[in-house]
Image (cartoon, coloured by chain):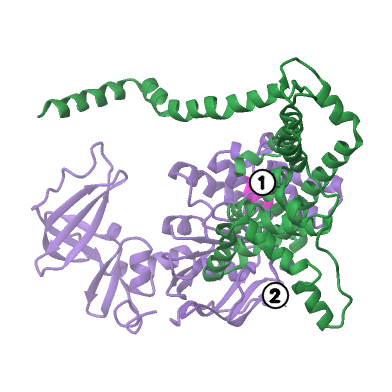
Amino acid sequence: MSNGARLRQRAGAALWRRPWLRGVLTLSPPLLWFLVVYLASLVTMLVTAFFSVNSLTGSVVYQWTWSNFSQILTQPVYGSIILRTLVMAVAVTVTDALVALPFAFFLAKIASRRWRQLLLAMLLLPLWASYLAKVYAWINILSDKGVLPGIESRLGLPTTHIAYSNIAMWIVFSYLWLPFMIVPIYGAFERVPDSLLEASSDLGAGAWSTFRWILLPMVLPGVVAGSIFTFSLTLGDFITPLLIGGSSSNFIGNAIYDSALNGGNLPFAAALAFVSIAIMAVYLLLARFAGAFEAL
Amino acid sequence: MSSLTSPATPLTDSQQGIVLRGVTKRFGTHVAVREVDLDIARGEFFTMLGPSGSGKTTLLRLIAGFEVPDAGTISLRGVDVTGKPPYQRGVNTVFQDYALFPHFTVAENVAYGLRVRRVPRIQRNDRVQAALEMVRMTEFAQRKPAQLSGGQRQRVALARAIVNEPEVLLLDEPLGALDLKLRQEMQVELKRIQRQIGITFIYVTHDQEEALTMSDRLAVFRDGQIEQIGPPTEVYERPATEFVASFVGTSNVIVTPAGRAVLRPEKIELTQGPPSPGHVGAEGRVVDVAYLGMVTRFTVELDDGRSITAVRQNRSVGGEKDSLLPTSEVTVSWDLADAFPLATTSGAESQPG
């Protein structure tokens, strides 16, 4: 046996005798990445939120202050931006959940193998397409010279003017994030054995009772898991509001973009990001109570 | 189907439990159940026995209403239920995997059928209590199914079904997942509960011993048809076909002057001298000895080349395995009255199904 091979064998045996060492070695690269790249930058940003900017020179003043936060809390424009973002995130989440439940049920419990594969492919295919392409496609559909008003006028119906409004954002967001809601709910339905549905029917329950008392409680963790995606993705978005939102459609993301890149006020942008993170943290805590993490 | 399979006397209305006529079920090109006629009396413990794929479970699911037959009718107490969903049939099922609702407690599981049928709460609580007492699970009422053992889940599944006071209880291999000891305990329990509430039990199993122990009558299934139907002693002692003879217990098929006959191993005498008076027999040589606990099984090769299986009870410590060794010369003999003739037209080789 060569020296190299012998050395490798001895190293392997030494590792085998020390499970803790194996754990340290496998965990340290991702842990290092997480600590340095992710957490450190996050902490830097959050600390920045408590600094301010000299209005004359535009340079950051490294002095502890609550001014950014008091500005966010007192100026009504930020209140309405935060409220708009929140309401939209909730509306998109609820819409996606309502669409996804019957779709995922069909996919998991009714569709034949062939249909299931086809529908899953159709569901996941748009995820390969660029986000921008999809938003522009919706502009093409909804704008005044677009597909939808075109069909409406041809059918002699009154034409709608949805584009560049909150309704347009709601439609586009719901479309964009729908797969992220369907997939976990589909998984949750898959985990419900058919015999439970048969047992429910056997015990006297009609379709609604079975859905209400057996299926819904069992797939609810899946719904909450999906809602984490739809909620956070909507909460953090700033491109869809920019492209298809109306004149007053700013999200928290747009306000961050504005103050960071146009206003040159990084501390204020960081404070806004803080708000975003806080909302998401509260949401995740609530989701944890609903048992969503077991369904992910 | 063999002519031996249908019960001789038609049941009166008050006795009538379940009546199947010409029930057929196909899955694609496979015929799972083929034109089955069956009459089960009220209060009967009826077992459907057969190897996997013989159609017994499909027939149970047809009676439960989980499958719709392609042909034939199913009536319950004189009412045609063929086109009715499970919850309009007055039957309840105990599932093979128990199918307990994991997010409900034991009590909630048992109460579910009463709740969806809008039984008032007070009455509901009493009945749940009574059902849990019946299966001796009262102290576990507030547990979740995940916190129970297999045998306990089985009891809850049983309580959840009987609390609805069905006319017929369907049991799909309910003891299949339990170990032997627990299975034997539950067999006794099931019989006790059936006697106590006096409803019809239709029991599906592939375990012939279970079928013989528990049933008032049993039907042996093969390829979607009933091969034989009757009380356990009749099916065991007088199997209609070679298939029944081999599926229910071990058996030897011998040729007698009257034709082929079935001879059970425990009815065969092995002697090293002349056979008992009145016995017929043959000479042979022991080729295999197997100690099975309660009995010892001997395989004997007769001089004409055929092979016979015989068992002896292990009356003494150490059993019988030393009494006859492989290569021992023995006389194999039996009372001709113990050899049950097989119907000549019906048999595994001559007529499939």
Mark 2 and mark 1 on one chain: no
Q: Nearer the viewer, residue B147 or B273?
A: B147
- Marking on residue A229: 1
Q: Residue at x 54, y 64 (%)?
A: A121
Q: Quadrant of residue A73?
A: top right
Q: Position of residue B306 (x, y in %)?
A: 15, 68
Q: Is residue A137 among the parts visible in the rendering?
A: yes
Q: Disc 2 sits on a residue from what chain?
A: B
Q: Position of residue A137 (x, y in %)?
A: 68, 65
Which secondary structure class fits the magenta region best? helix
Q: Which chain is green?
A: A
Q: Position of residue B337 (x, y in %)?
A: 31, 69
Q: Is residue B90 among the parts visible in the rendering?
A: no
Q: Which chain is purple?
A: B
Say which amino acid is labelled 1: Phe
Q: Which residue is mark 2?
A: B81
Q: Which residues are magenta?
A: B156-160
Q: Disc 1 sits on a residue from what chain?
A: A
Q: Position of residue A192 (x, y in %)?
A: 61, 53
Mark 2–mark 1 distance (CA, rounded to whole Å) = 47 Å
